[in-house]
Amino acid sequence: MNQPLADRIRPKSFKDVIGNDKLITTLEALVKNDNLVSMILYGPTGVGKTTLADIIAAHYPMNHFRFNASTDNKAILKQIIDTVKLYHNVVLIIDEIHRMNRDIQDYLLPYVEKGHITMIGITTENPYISVNPAVRSRVSIFKVTRPSRADIENLIRKIDIAEIKKAIAITDEVYKKIALVSNGEVRTAINMLELLLLVAEENDVIDFSFLEKHLPEAQISAFKTGDDYYDILSAFHKSVRGSDVNAALHYLARLIAADDLKSLVRRIRAIVYEDIGLANPLMGVKVEAACSLAEAVGFPEAKNALGAIVIEMCISPKSNSAHLAIQKALDDVTSGKTFQVPSHLINNPTYDNAQEYKYAHDFPDHIVKQAYLPKELQGVVYYTPQEHTKLEKAFAEEYLKNEKIIK
């Protein structure tokens, strides 16, 4: 059996990696200056986490090791750590770091902390949730994101297909469709192209009809949406937001035909809190129930639950006040407005000017005048109520009453 194409053409240097330009610049500088730090690389499958770790490890050919947190045990880790005595510092790549048990973590962490081991953890899970805080506090955490569709298309166009099968022609449409349906996963796109090349005969033309003949049905369904899959998702989202039941059902049907339940329910879950929000908070519970049922029964039965909930979402009153509020707050945080927390909100304040915390439940109506925001942000307003629905109008009245007391 031949080595898979995706492995054969795996990038050997940072300049060959597509996407994640800012991260690549940082990693390249760390390696170039021999200032490598322990880190965790996290993100979805097929986006290059292992590739980045391998490129880093290649700069330390004599003293890097791999450890799989799912399958390897403490004895294997001990063997690796024994080499520290020879090299004084080793690079340790840990696959599936979120599965590393506490016993192994406790054994490993002192070596990471002293710099004897430079750890590169790899995971598809969010490390802020899935990785022990003791590990997180000792590493830098980098998110590896999906490359753009254009990046993937450019990559697969550069593959020397003659190496696999000579005298083969591939149409532009096929390259575009592969980049589209790969959903940002480089490995998926390469594997799809390789499959087509392997089943092709010399002088074949790989066009859309060839795709229909040879690719798995689930992938073909995604191709058959007729337009850009993400354009249809966008049209579906905007139709629900615009309360057009029939348009939403039309685009829903096209998405169901694409047979990508995971992307569909993800979008529905996003819509309910972005566009319905505080106008109908219970809709979030209903959507979650419908999406969970759809995931449990799968297609074709899932279409009934999805159809029903999409109709109700369209008819529901809409509000984006919560979406706007959290986005405004995030904009402040990402722009650097992260000031010192008021001393009276900290359990064990060490500030010299610590103030007494007032326990709200001890006051009338369970609300008390005191500052909660950092002093630099006092008076800032993130949430602006929208009063066109009865429920949020009631929220607005309570919100404004509380604000008068607190301020």
Image: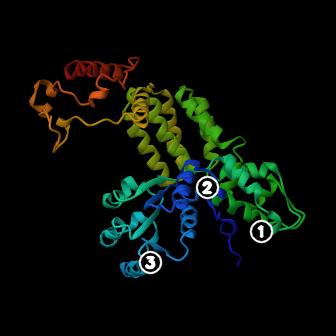
The first of marks 3 and 2 along the sequence is 3
Residue closer to the observer: 221 or 100? 100
Q: CA distance from mark 3 to mark 2?
A: 37 Å
Residue holding disc 2: 185
Q: Which residue is mark 3?
A: 87
Rendered location of residue 20, percent (x, y): 57, 50
Task: Choose mark 3 or mark 1, whichever is in front.
Answer: 3
Type of amino acid under label 1: Leu
Quadrant of the image containing the C terminus: top left
Q: Work out whether mark 2 precedes mark 1 in sequence or the reverse, and give the earlier one.
A: 2
Kindly check if marks 3 and 1 are in contact, taking CB atoms under 8 A apart as contact.
Answer: no
Q: What label sits on residue 347 in the rendered view?
A: none
**10 Å crowding of disc 1: few (<14), some (14-19), many (20+):** few
What amino acid is labelled 2 in the image? Glu
Cα distance between the residues tagged 3 and 1: 45 Å
Disc number lying in front (3 or 2): 3
Against 26, residue 164 (above or below) is below
Quick check: can you spot residue 212? no
- Residue at point 44% right, 40% down? 287
- Answer with left or right where residue 243 lies relative to residue 369: right
